[in-house]
Image: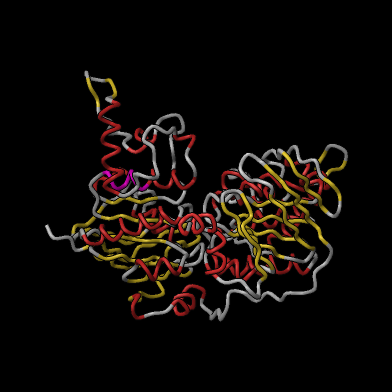
Amino acid sequence: MQLTGLRVSGVAKSFAGVPAVREVSLDFPAGAVTALMGENGAGKSTLIRILGGDHLPDAGHLELDGVPLELTTPADARAAGIRVIAQEPEIVPHVSVAENVYLGSLPRRAGHMLDRAALRERMRSDLARLGFDRDLDPDTLGSKLTAAQRQLVEIMRALTTEAKVIAFDEPTSSLSDHETEALFALIGRLRAQGLVVIYVSHRMREIFRLADRVAVLRDGALVGVRETADTTDQEIVRMMVGRDLSTLFSRKHSELGPVMLEVDAVTTDDVREVSLRVHAGEVVALAGLVGAGRSELAGALAGDLPIRSGEVRVDGKRLRLRQPRDAVRAGIGYAPEERKAQALLLHRGVRDNITLAMLDRLRRWRFVRRGAERRLALEYVEALRVRTPSIEQEVRKLSGGNQQKVVLARWLARKPKVLILDEPTRGVDVGAKVEIYHVIEELAASGVAVLVISSELPEVLGLADRIVVMQQGRITGELDRAEAGEESILALAMAADLTSQSA
């Protein structure tokens, strides 16, 4: 039967009386990639969860190829041929990659015994067919996978079964350049096969490269649909945020203070003899490709990873960083890349998460002064415009952008001398990005030394006073903002590869 596509008609959904999706009617044609865009909290995730059977709509209905759908559970969605690839995949830690991919359909022999040879062969065949044979080992345990590999497992799960609709939710947020290219090629094949492809991303370059059409949500309602060939990124941003953002970056670069962070010949298990300086009031960006060692350096400076040799000084004082507490007491704040796994207490409230690094200053004897704690949390919720019903709301229920604001609020409250931000706008919409950039600007203006790790080159170029580039655990060069460009950064990020090719 010829596939016609997925139709959403008048779908609405509210939580505790607050509308999340407002009577959305939208077609997702077969054989086309439809990008779904909007700020965090615009309703994208709720709509995707309705399609995946996780939420029942309060009103409206769905059709697939002209047939009405009743999706009361995720199993109903899978039976209908709808696959949702989540941004935060769930991995069984103590079984292999192959077992994670084929859970529920594992090959058996002798009645009940797992046929490991058949499983491994099936996995290798599917990896080669989908273009990920360089990226996953079928025998690796789930607990040993990187964030990028966990994402690939989720993609493999969806594509090794028969599907009519594939919805990707921020699929490249953890992928390397090679893995991203393999995914883009795969999406091209899915389009050619006539599947419905829904692509949720905040990355404009990806949208304009992949999508045939863009549907924009704002405040739960559909603002409009544009053919990609007939629109611009500026128009999409205006539709998303309801206003014109002529530029994402408005930072004014001022006079720098004394050197605040000094790193001299620091060596860890992953980085070698790294030296750098960050002045008070300066934003220094760490650029490089995936695996360059940037996050590992940040973890070492935050006391989370052991330093084998070298010295770290803050405000001229030499530090002994044996644990994160040492870094915090020395005036170093750290917002890691994996905010859900490493930065947030997901089942605790906004108040608890904001004041986590301040309890030593909020105590009287052994008791936390709850009134002072609440006032502090409210102050930074208002200052950063965190969208939350209350400061007691569980952080896991907030959008990604608001979760990141909570992490930033924690360190703003602590008033650090040095703040390390690892991928601060990963998975964050355009409007929230602008707000985070303003926070970084205000921190620098107040005299904080800011070290930013970012894989988005426009972000690096727009934020930084200086750019330090790493490859394979070493610094390959440093660029002043006046001389830096995407080409010069990439040349330094690939310096060893380019040298070996020319040799």
Spot occupied by residue 135 in the image (x, y as percentages of width and height): 40, 45
Who's the residue at 76% across and 50% down the image?
A: 264
Q: Residue furthest right?
A: 365
227 above or below 478?
Answer: below
199 above or below 347?
Answer: below
Span shown in magenta: 155-160
The residue closer to the viewer here, 401 or 65, is 401
The residue closer to the viewer here, 3 or 233, is 233
Most prominent secondary structure in the magenta stretch? Answer: helix
Q: Does the magenta portion include 192?
A: no
Who's the residue at 41% across and 50% down the image?
A: 86
Spot occupied by residue 150 in the image (x, y as percentages of width and height): 44, 43
Query: 93 left or right of 307?
Result: left
Query: 159 left or right of 345?
Result: left
Q: Quadrant of the N terminus?
A: bottom left
Query: 216 left or right of 487?
Result: left
Spot occupied by residue 219 in the image (x, y as percentages of width and height): 48, 68
Who's the residue at 53% across and 64% down the image?
A: 491
Spot occupied by residue 437 in the image (x, y as percentages of width and height): 64, 68
Q: Residue furthest top?
A: 110
Who's the residue at 52% across and 74% down the image?
A: 241
Colour mode? secondary structure
User: How many numbered discs sit on the rendered protein?
Assistant: 0
